[in-house]
Image (cartoon, rainbow, N blue to C red):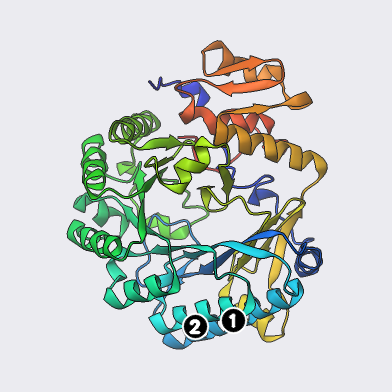
Amino acid sequence: MFRYHPDLLAAPVPRYTSYPTAAQFGEDVGAADLAQRLDTISADARLSLYVHIPYCHDICWYCGCNTGAATRPRRLSAYVDALEREMALVSARLGGRGRVTHVAFGGGSPNSLPLIDWVRLNHQLLLCFDASAAAMAVELDPRRIDRAWIDAMAKVGVTRVNLGVQTFATHVQQRIGRVQPAETVAMAVGALARARIQVGFDLMYGLPGQSEADLAQTLEDSIRLSPSRIALFGYAHMPRLLPRQRRIDTTELPGVEQRFAMAKLGHAMLTAAGYQAIGFDHFALPDDPLAVAAASGRLRRNFQGFTEDDSDALIGMGASAISQFPDLIVQNEKNAGAYREALSDHRLPAARGVRRSADDQRRGALIERLLCDGRAACGDLAEPALLDRFERIGLLRREGNELMLQPGAAPYARSIAACFDAYLRPAETRFSVAV
């Protein structure tokens, strides 16, 4: 189904979890902009909350997240104190307006916190926001899940857990600093299923020392465990921006052609097993809310990837967390110390971002619909010279102002979307390869 066109995959492109992307964030946007936007949230607005825990017990070498080692209990406790203060500040700005429909805990690993602190944060959420009926998702390290965590999540009302699996191949795990026996993951999946919590897997291809056979075995093992959704990401090796990746041997990384073959293999195996392809890197069983949203044209894309969350505004809390509104994107202080300091002074910790112009919003909507639905109305934004090469080889079809991705276009979706990116430079180095 997928044909390899190396010239179309040569240029690095963003993942487009926002538009403009984080590369356009500046320090002229900050706390005052966020405060003003929170003040104007309407009473009936649907809100999504993201809570970031930037800690892990073990730091994986491949990871591109903002996270540090969870080795100092007092530091973790101080961070939770700061998060509680941020929730209170945001709640005071909202003044009871808005209805929370989704809550997501991400990281890092939220279960790097002591369980009692995670429960504290959930209690604060209920005190500060109308979130009692919200769907709740938590990203977890499967090596740190026990009965107490599962019982607590069930009582709090967690509806879905995402497990960072990445690969089941032991020799690949050793090359990325994340060794976790398959039996550990299987036990976590079984316990979560008994608690009636849906499970998703994060898997990766393009890892050091990883072969197509390694990926195939990981996919077979994953399919056997039957998570309701799977995200299959291509590893992005950017050691200049992420020093921890310097521990990875670049000579063992698969090349672009092999990465393409892995993406093709993943799509073939997962769809054959009954998963529906969602966007360019997600897969979901037909009854999963992600698949239901895709089938009904309600699929969205934000900083958490493809999502069924169609809220009017996303409010991020925690160090480096990002809030997104139609005309504003704003990010909190990345450094946990600076984040805590701002909240000690009773200040919102927003530090950088971008105001979205009318043109930004039009382009952002086009890119989102193209990536989510495989089609979009381009209006006067189309640049035929950039799109012609995709159309000539059958990856794209145009009917008037309507653009339609064709079968086999998924690996090139980001490259096609990049044709509408007014900020992307020809010699871009801040983004990963397109597949």
Q: Is residue 187 above or below residue 363?
A: below
Q: Secondary structure at mark 1?
A: helix
Q: Is residue 74 visible?
A: yes
Q: Secondary structure at mark 2?
A: helix
List x then y, in percent, for residue 240. 51, 52
Residue 84 tag number: 1
Q: Quadrant of residue 320?
A: bottom right
Seen from the viewer's position, the closer of residues 75 and 251 is 75
Q: Which amino acid lies under the numbered mark 2 shown in the image of this protein?
A: Arg
Seen from the viewer's position, the closer of residues 83 and 146 is 146
Seen from the viewer's position, the closer of residues 26 and 398 is 398
Q: Residue at x 47, y 56 (%)?
A: 64
Q: Which of marks 2 and 1 precedes in the sequence? A: 1
Q: Residue at x 70, y 68 (%)?
A: 350
Q: Is residue 199 above or below residue 208?
A: below
Assess whether mark 2 and mark 1 are in contact (beta carbons under 8 angstroms).
Answer: yes
Would you say 252 lies left or right of 393 here? left
List x then y, in percent, for residue 87. 63, 76
Q: Residues within 10 Å of mark 1 (few under 14, many from 20)?
A: many
| Quarter of the image that includes the N terminus | top left
To which residue does mark 2 refer? 120
Would you say 255 lies left or right of 407 here? left
Residue 264 tag number: none
Q: Which amino acid lies under the numbered mark 1 shown in the image of this protein?
A: Glu
> Which residue appears farthest toward the left when viewing the image?
183
Q: How much space separates mark 1 and mark 2, taking CA atoms?
A: 8 Å
Q: Quadrant of residue 182?
A: bottom left
List x then y, in percent, for residue 134. 54, 64
Q: Residue at x 36, y 32 (%)?
A: 267
